Image: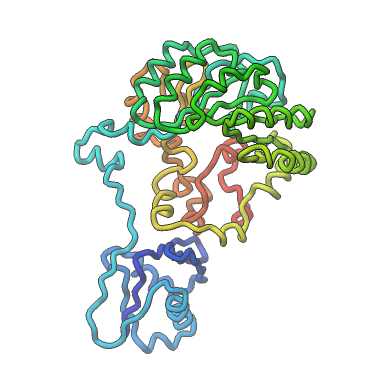
Amino acid sequence: MIWLYLYPFVFISEDLDNFLFYNSLIFKRICFKKNTILVSIVKQLQDIDQLYSVKIHVKDLEDVHLLNFVETIQALGLGDIIEGNLEKPLIMPPVLNLQKSAERLKEHKVPIGENILSYLHEVSIYVSGTCLFNCPDCQDRYKQYLCCTKSADVLDPALLKNFLFSTYYTGAAITLSGGNIFQYKGLEDILSILEGIDAIHTLVSDWRNIPEDLRLLSRIRKESFRLKILVNELADVSSIIAIAQKIKNLQIKQCWEIGITSFPEYEDAEILGEQLSGLVDDVTIRPFYTGENIDFFEECIFIDQEELDNIELDKQGVFALQALNTNNFGKITILSDGNVYANVNEKPLGHIQDPIKEMLCEELEKGTSWRRTRYDLEPCSQCRYKLICPSPSNYELAIGKNNLCHINPL
């Protein structure tokens, strides 16, 4: 008789046909095809009361599938065996235990809002929608990724100041966006407040809205801010390079983001990125789904087997994917009409005048964005790779398909 046991940093996931074993210490993974004997063995390993060990009779190892399973577990550092009449090994399986989860707090009658502000990490604020340009898909881009957008609304500077003071000591990073944010009348006062918040804050602007007069930028504390400059339409490369050089001279950290919708645009964006590389801190090429370029997304964005095989998640990383959306958790957005969102594709949590704690509690309890995981979405919930697959993003919402992958194409 032998005991087969798994190490506490090993996770198990499954689908209809396969088991996935993942070693979160050395980032190794292996899939096993299901059969009658393996299903029985793994079911016992998954039983938390069995403490990650199962008794196997030596005679059972005559089954080539079971023998291969045991040898592979040992070879990949997923577990080991103990031979002889020794006591059962006691291993604590990696079970998620959210001491401060909404359900656990309610169960023990602890106020959910007691430390809710500690969850707030990023706030994106659209201060004004004023802009002279007409970029394609202006009203849709910001719903897929952080991007400027036009609107008829202007956020009341007094309300914005009150909000910033209410979250002042959270250390949340603030991003200011909108149409042309440099035309926002309260901008200088807002920047003065942000300088006192211990975080790196971001100003988002289309490259054409960067002002000729950069005195405002020269007065801000350089280590507290960065510029995120958007190129939604590739044109006038020489002017783009000139602006990047001008900002570099001010020693302001600048990152550029180039929006693309096709392969030709991707090629042009790469060329521009190379030209900017010596001047700026970072260049990102950001795909945008138009509703008509799904082939482009399937080839460039959808995750494939090779990408899954290269994912490296530690134990906490796997736990995070089980409990919350790592793209959205701790983030809110305030649009220029004052409405507050956990995700701009969902219903608002409230208004900027409402108590911030109440709005965050609402999101943490209902989980429409912060807790949107693949474990709760079809067909991802039935896929073994949900264990390590990145959290759903806004691309899934835009495309109307949860599994942007080539693993389970249904």
Residue at the image point whose x is 26% and y is 43% from the top = 104
Q: Is residue 178 above or below residue 326?
A: above
In this view of the protein, which residue sits in the foreground, 99 or 47? Answer: 99
Q: Residue at x 42, y 20 (%)?
A: 193
Left or right of residue 350: residue 292: right
Does residue 71 show up?
yes
Determine the image quadrant of residue 74. bottom left
Question: Can you see residue 410?
Answer: no
Whole-percent x and y of residue 233?
A: 74, 29
Residue 118, given in percent of the width and then of the height, sits at: 33, 35
Query: Looking at the picture, does residue 280 appear above or below residue 378?
Result: above
Residue furthest to the front: 249
Instruction: Using the image as rendered, state which of residue 126 and residue 216 is in the foreground.
Output: 216
Q: Dividing the picture into quarters, in which one does residue 407 lie?
A: bottom right
Quadrant for the N terminus, please. Answer: bottom left
Q: Residue at x 47, y 38 (%)?
A: 328
Q: Position of residue 126 (x, y in %)?
A: 53, 21
In the image, what residue occupies the spot 41% across and 62% down?
Answer: 11
